[in-house]
Image (tube, rainbow, N blue to C red):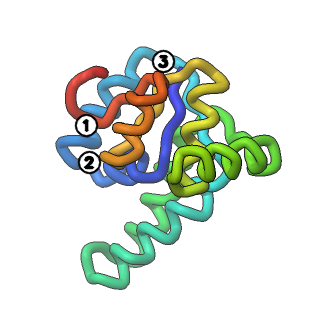
Amino acid sequence: MYVLDCSAAAEMVRGTERGERFVSVLEAGEAVVSSELIQAELPSVFWKYARGGWCTKAVALASVDAALDLVTAFVPLGETRTEALSEAIRLDHSPYDMAYFVLARRFGATLLTCDKRLSALCRREGVEVFDGGTRA
């Protein structure tokens, strides 16, 4: 099982080299879960791309839909809110990132992320992570 965060999902649908490495990992056909948070984060990312002139509105809309289609199941924020905040305080890390961290830990899943700080935290805390480079 995999937990997909916004950064990895965005790279996957953009077709970057790193994104292709995430895609190749998912070809095993395992379940992909994510926090409902991704449904707000992805539009924000692609709004920035459209605003910066790196893509059109149509591409931004299609990219968000394609990224969300990568997810097998969305976990409601209410199911992780308290644990994510507690871990954010304990580990001095963003509650947004902790939503994904908590899911990966709960499910014994591999977190897919491009976030270097989050990757380092996962490794330190014993949560399996793939950052688009080599398998950790």
Q: Nearer the viewer, residue 15 or 6?
A: 6
Q: Is residue 14 left or right of residue 96?
A: left
Q: Are marks 3 and 2 in contact (CB under 8 Å)?
A: no
What's the CA distance linking mark 2 and mark 1? 6 Å
Locate the C terminus and report the quarter of the image it occupies. top left
Q: Is residue 65 left or right of residue 45?
A: right
Residue to which mark 1 is pinned: 20
Mark linked to residue 15: 2
Few, some or many residues within 10 Å of mark 2 (<14, 14–19, 20+):
few
Q: Residue at x 39, y 53 (%)?
A: 10
Name the image quarter holding residue 80: top right
Question: Which x, y percent locates residue 111?
Answer: 47, 32
Q: Are marks 1 and 3 in contact (CB under 8 Å)?
A: no
Q: Residue furthest top?
A: 28
Mark linked to residue 29: 3
Q: Residue furthest front?
A: 90
Question: What amino acid type should be assigned to the residue bearing mark 1?
Answer: Glu
For numbered disc 2, what is the local secondary structure?
loop
First of labels 1, 3 by sequence position:
1
Q: Residue furthest left?
A: 17
First of labels 3, 2 by sequence position:
2
Few, some or many residues within 10 Å of mark 3 (<14, 14–19, 20+):
few
Locate the N terminus and report the quarter of the image it occupies. top right
Q: Nearer the viewer, residue 37 or 51?
A: 37
